[in-house]
Image: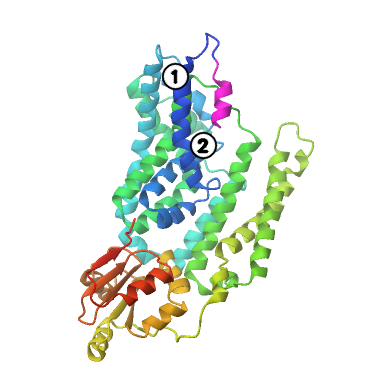
């Protein structure tokens, strides 16, 4: 994208100052390339949750910038760039500095609309944990993501009516005040188009209940959404016209959103999870093959969208034919875990006590340390602990020395759950706490941890000082 912008940066009235242009492109590269790398393939909404859980909040905020930039390439945002920057006067500014200032003000206007979404999402997080334990809510969320995926595949368009869009586009006028108001308006116009990108982010932010993360992520998203507006307004860039590449972005977005629908159902209903629970390499091979077939058909669809393409008539049938193998292959591949075949069953399974009071009484009577696991049905990292860490042979073996207590915190409005989370100062899920024989906390894990460090912590529990391992985003 940067290279293509460079070839377009010429003006009828003379040549753009090369030093300033080089500096602008370097800054743009530094901002965009890492963000897009973390954002992953196109607009897969579920990537935000994966990045947050794997790499932490800072990287997730950076990835949000990449998601915002990709969202700006959608068909109902991208064509608005040259029109909008001309309305608030950036392209006609007497100096490049004024053009940059006007464009930056416009982008801040966009951020002023989106950032409160992150704050509101985080503040509503108290309800989200309980809501996701409800089967009907899970099904509704899956249906929402399927609808968003269908919109990306062309079943219908998410956009404000053209008449309203045209009327809104005239609001504001020239100058800094007009630029800021135009930014607010553009955020409103772009909201339906960015919905598929934002829905997953907002849902994850609500689950994290982190106001700082919510505001930072949505602010970063808005900055990414405004990059093209800033570049066009500052340097009077003639952006490449939309075409087949835009159809490719929509296709990738649709596949990613369909996977998110499946993911909600898989994590909530065991019957769905069992469909992709086979650890055999044959299953993995089939998953990869299906994904490649879907990708190949999708590429033919994109190629057929090129101008004067001799295979233009294949665009729609290839798109329709690609959806099922691409989505099925992606769902199977991302759910496939070959480690499941290597579970060591030589040691007995961990026997979990569901009553905290009974468990603590038993531990005191038997002189054993205590292992307390706080988890929920909607918590991805909790599922990983259940499927990878707790079944491991060494963990099972060491767990026989403990009294294991499991607290189901799916319903965080439950009185007993609230009491225990307050008693043990649980800030987020998962939380695994190890107490010594005297009932004092020794180690705490607040994220997914592999069997090896988990076993090491269990072995060192006697006589160690209280430590905290990991941190919640």
State left or right for residue 307 relative to residue 226: right
The reply to whether residue 225 is in sight is: no
| Residue shown at 45% from the left, 87% from the top | 348
Q: How far across and down, in percent of the image, does residue 429 sit?
A: 34, 65
Q: Is 102 drawn above or below residue 281 in the view shown? A: above
Seen at 51% across and 29% down, the residue is 80
Residue 8 magenta: yes
Of all residues, the one furthest to the bottom in this rendering is 365
The range drawn in magenta is 1-10
Q: Quadrant of the N terminus?
A: top right
Q: Nearer the N terminus, badge 2 or badge 1?
A: 1
Q: CA distance from mark 2 to mark 1?
A: 39 Å
Q: Secondary structure at mark 1?
A: helix
Circle number at residue 161: 2
Residue 87 visible in the current orientation: yes
- Do callouts 2 and 1 mark residues in contact (Cβ within 8 Å)? no
Q: Nearer the viewer, residue 211 or 112?
A: 211
* Secondary element type, mark 2: loop
Question: Which residue shows up at 51% across the image and 40% down it?
Answer: 70
The overriding secondary structure of the stretch rendered in magenta is helix
Tag 1 residue: 20
x and y, in percent, of residue 60 in the image: 41, 49
Task: Say which of 209 and 22 sits in front.
Answer: 22
Q: Position of residue 355 (x, y in %)?
A: 30, 83
Which x, y percent locates residue 368? 27, 85
The 10 Å Cα crowd at callout 2, few under 14, some 14 to 19, many 20 or more, is few
Residue lying farthest to the right in this orientation: 310
Query: In the image, is residue 252 above or below residue 446?
Result: above
Residue 279 quadrant: bottom right
């Amino acid at each position: 994208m940067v290279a293509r912008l460079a070839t377009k940066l010429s003006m009828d009235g003379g040549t753009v100052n090369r030093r300033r242009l080089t500096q602008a492109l370097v800054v743009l590269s530094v901002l965009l390339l890492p963000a897009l790398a973390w954002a992953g393939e196109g607009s897969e909404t579920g990537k935000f949750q994966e990045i947050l859980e794997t790499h932490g909040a800072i990287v997730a905020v950076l990835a949000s910038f990449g998601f915002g930039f990709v969202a700006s390439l959608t068909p109902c945002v991208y064509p608005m760039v040259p029109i909008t920057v001309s309305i608030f006067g950036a392209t006609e500014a007497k100096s490049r500095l004024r053009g940059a200032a006007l464009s930056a003000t416009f982008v801040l206007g966009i951020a002023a609309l989106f950032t409160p979404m992150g704050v509101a999402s985080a503040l509503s997080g108290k309800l989200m944990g309980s809501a996701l334990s409800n089967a009907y809510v899970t099904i509704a969320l899956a249906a929402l993501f399927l609808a968003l995926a269908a919109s990306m595949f062309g079943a219908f368009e998410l956009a404000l009516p053209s008449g309203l869009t045209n009327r809104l586009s005239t609001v504001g006028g020239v100058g800094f005040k007009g630029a800021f108001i135009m930014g607010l308006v553009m955020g409103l116009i772009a909201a339906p188009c960015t919905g598929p990108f934002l829905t997953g982010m907002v849902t994850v932010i609500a689950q994290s209940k982190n106001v700082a993360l919510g505001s930072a992520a949505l602010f970063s998203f808005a900055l990414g959404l405004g990059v093209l507006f800033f570049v066009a307004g500052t340097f009077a860039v003639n952006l490449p016209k939309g075409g087949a590449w835009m159809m490719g972005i929509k296709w990738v977005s649709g596949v990613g959103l369909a996977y998110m629908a499946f993911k909600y159902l898989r994590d909530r209903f065991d019957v769905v999870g069992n469909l992709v629970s086979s650890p055999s390499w044959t299953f993995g091979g089939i998953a990869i093959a299906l994904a490649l077939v879907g990708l190949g058909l999708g590429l033919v669809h994109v190629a057929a969208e090129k101008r004067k393409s001799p295979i233009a008539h294949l665009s729609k049938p290839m798109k329709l034919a690609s959806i099922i193998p691409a989505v099925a292959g992606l769902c199977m591949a991302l759910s496939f875990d070959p480690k499941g075949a290597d579970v060591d069953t030589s040691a007995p399974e961990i026997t979990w006590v569901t009553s905290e009071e009974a468990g603590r009484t038993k531990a005191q009577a038997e002189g054993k340390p205590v292992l307390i696991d706080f988890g929920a049905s909607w918590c991805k990292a909790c599922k990983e602990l259940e499927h990878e860490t707790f079944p491991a042979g060494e963990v099972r073996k060491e767990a026989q020395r403990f009294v294991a207590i499991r607290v189901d915190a799916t319903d965080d409005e439950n009185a007993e759950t609230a009491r225990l989370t307050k008693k043990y100062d649980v800030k987020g899920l998962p939380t695994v706490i190890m107490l010594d024989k005297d009932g004092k906390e020794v180690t705490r894990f607040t994220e997914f941890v592999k069997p090896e460090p988990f076993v090491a912590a269990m072995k060192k529990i006697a006589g160690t000082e209280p430590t905290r391992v990991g941190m919640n985003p």
